[in-house]
Amino acid sequence: MKLNIAVLPGDGIGPEITQQSVKVLKAVADRFDHDFYFEEALVGAVAIDFSGSPLPDSTLELCKRSDAVLFGAIGDPKYDNDPSAKVRPEQGLLKLRKELGLFANIRPVKAYDQLVERSPLKVENVIGADMVIFRELTGGIYFGEKSTSEDGKSASDLCTYNVEEIERIAHLAFKAAQIRSKKLTLVDKANVLETSRLWRKTVTELAKQYPDVILDFLFVDNAAMQMVLDPKQFDVILTENMFGDILSDEASVIGGSIGLLESASIGARNALFEPIHGSYPQATGLGIANPIASILSSAMLLEHFDLKEEAAVIRKAVEMSINLNVCTKDINKDNHYSTSKVGDFLESIISETEHPVINNENLNLGQMTII
Ligand SMILES: NC(=O)c1ccc[n+]([C@@H]2O[C@H](COP(=O)([O-])OP(=O)(O)OC[C@H]3O[C@@H](n4cnc5c(N)ncnc54)[C@H](O)[C@@H]3O)[C@@H](O)[C@H]2O)c1
Ligand SMILES: CC(C)[C@H](C(=O)O)[C@@H](O)C(=O)O
Ligand SMILES: [Mg+2]
């Protein structure tokens, strides 16, 4: 298969993790005889430095004409610490999502058996947890009208949704539930917010088309608590933009690190694949960032094009690196590997060449077999 992939490394750890994904995708292309073409472009703070815009027109054009976008991360402390900055790196990502119509952000969360001991949550609560969060991505308070009064003493962000915006992502979430454990939980704040009441009404109506799926509801404050008390109760979570942002970072403690959480942002024509984490500026250039979230996002990219076997090879290689403890320090505190060493390891497993790090005497090879 021929795929043109736009690569937007962005800021902070974005370039180092994205580089590992490209390595892995190239190994997949070689192994399965595909033609993957990569073209890089600027986004975020680096794009502001270069052109004054967090999403230059040339970057947007590249994304529009590519088959898929591989996104790293954006964000820089110089903007985080300056609330009055009018041009901000995050605007690049938000504009990209809007312009490409990426309304559904799919964030799978699971507890790897080998890592449950590392989760701050109780092992018995976490083991077997496996859910997917469907986060609405182009509406809600993120995109409503914004204003600040002239005297700077009040500000407003409007939250709006319409039925069509709710229905299109709800269909995807119901379909996902049908091929999973057939349970869909709508997370909202319908006891307070008009928009949430519209979500409840619309989703309840739609549920009639999916009689095999059990629909239930949770208020977001309770959902935040249930997420850590009993994450195994969740199968598919459907929620609006901001609740999904917050709940998915919270859910990452189940897996042991946010550096493991992949995501796909899907629209009618375009698709973008991004880790859920940010630019982790403190780690820039130190080689400690976990590249797995980005690499698994690349697996989602392949699944999007129905390259299931290819994606499975990536997922199996990742399982293997976790089993063998070839991991960065967020999940391997004592004997960690650098970002690029983890990438090299996965690349070598996929391309079935010699493993550059596997001879390390501290590795416990156990019963592992190389695919
Ligand atoms: N999609 C995105 O590009 C995105 C997402 C979230 C935040 N941001 C931006 O990133 C910047 C930093 O934000 P933040 O500190 O709140 O969130 P962050 O996700 O960058 O980092 C939060 C914490 O998560 C951990 N972490 C994140 N990525 C990791 C990785 N790959 N490996 C290991 N540990 C990892 C680290 O402990 C880090 O301190 C801000 O400018 C923010 O706006 C961007
Ligand atoms: C950087 C920010 C705009 C973004 C969001 O809030 O959507 C991030 O937190 C994410 O989860 O992708
Ligand atoms: Mg977020």
Image: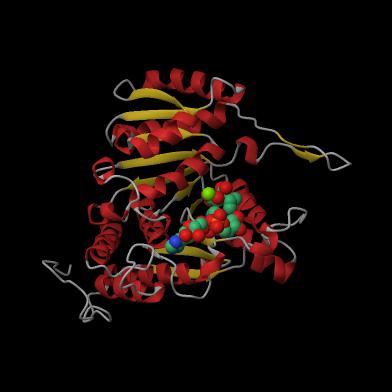
Name the image quarter holding the N terminus: bottom left
Which residue is depicted at the point 62% across and 50% down?
94
Locate residue 182, reporting x and y percent: 29, 30
Q: Quadrant of residue 25?
A: bottom left
Colouring method of the image: secondary structure
User: Is residue 102 in sight in this rendering?
Assistant: yes
Name the image quarter holding the C terminus: bottom left
Q: How many marks?
A: 0
| 43 with respect to 185 (left or right) | right
- Say if 322 sits above or below 344 in the image: above
In the displayed image of the protein, which residue is found farthest to the right? 151
- Say if 369 sits above or below 266 in the image: below
- Say if 320 sits above or below 211 in the image: below
| 9 with respect to 214 (left or right) | right
Residue placed most toward the observer, 255 or 109: 255
Which residue is depicted at the point 36% across and 69% down?
24
Residue placed most toward the observer, 249 or 209: 249
Locate residue 12, reporting x and y percent: 56, 67
In the displayed image of the protein, which residue is found farthest to the left? 367
Residue placed most toward the observer, 7 or 3: 7
User: Is residue 66 in sight in this rendering?
Assistant: no
- Say if 270 sits above or below 169 in the image: below
